Amino acid sequence: MDRVRTGIPGLDDVLGGGFVKGSLVLLTGTTGTGKTILASQYIYNGLARYKENCVYVSFEERAEDIKRNMLNFGWDFEQYERAGKLIFVKYDPFHMEDIYGLIENQIRNVGAKRVVLDSITGLGLNIRDPSDLRAAIFNLGRILKKLGCTAIFTSETPSDNHMMLSRYGVEEYVADDLIVLYYIPVGTEFRRAITVWKMRGSEHSKKIHPFRITEKGVTVYPHEETALKLERG
């Protein structure tokens, strides 16, 4: 089974060697859990360490803001844009008419193998019907699979219910893999944790592992476990 290594310290161990090549990965969590940082680290490592071209599609933040924030971790995306190895796309979720063609063309133009869509929660601002939203996510996934990409979709979950896996309750059924990030109070402090909820056709850790965000990005601790009390809303 071909694997795509994330290059994120500790995460590939938790994943059993990395993402399965060509998989669609849903990365969920509440605001502030580090979804954009982890997704950006996946893209940057693909460019810098594994020589894979990438596309980053944002439905919310401006590309300029993402790139500026990621400089705090030493990740200079603009050098790869200038070299034609990376394309940032800021897309308005209120205009879905040509999104499929736009994303497909950008992936083909750069020959991308890694793609991030951050965040598909924004799609729900325009697509209210759950069946239509599921179809939109499915169509995006179909394009990515056709082009052989290994992609991360981010999705924001409600902060008052840590057992919810996605905002709209449909995203997790389209994804091959599901990774959940937590940032919740334990005693007198907040702790970050990560778990792999599912990976189709692949073994992975079933435990909840702590992780930290440092000046170098995300580090997961695969040999440590954490107990989080997850309240139902």
Image (tube, grey):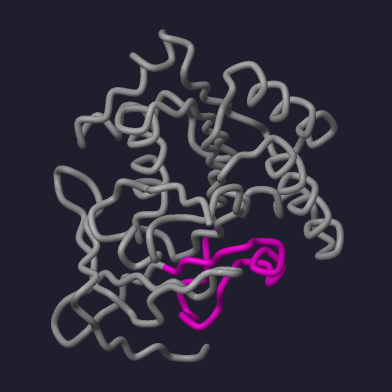
Q: Is residue 46 above or below residue 217?
A: above
Q: Magenta stretch containing residue 161, yes or no?
A: yes
Q: Residue furthest toward the top?
A: 82
Q: Is residue 184 above or below residue 72?
A: below
In front of the other: 190 or 111: 111
Whole-percent x, y for residue 167 in the image: 61, 67
Q: How many marks?
A: 0
Residue drawn 29% across and 34% down? 70
Whole-percent x, y for residue 143 in the image: 75, 40
Whole-percent x, y for residue 67 in the image: 36, 27
In front of the other: 94 or 78: 78
Residue drawn 45% across and 47% down? 4
Residue drawn 39% across and 43% down? 42
Q: Is residue 66 above or below residue 30?
A: above
Magenta stretch mostly in which secondary structure?
loop
Q: Is residue 79 left or right of residue 110?
A: left
Q: Is residue 171 above or below residue 107?
A: below
Whole-percent x, y for residue 105 in the image: 72, 22
Q: Magenta stretch containing residue 190, yes or no?
A: no
Residue drawn 42% across and 46% down? 39
- Where are the magenta residues, as a range? 155-180
Q: Is residue 123 left or right of residue 227?
A: right
Q: Quadrant of residue 146?
A: top right
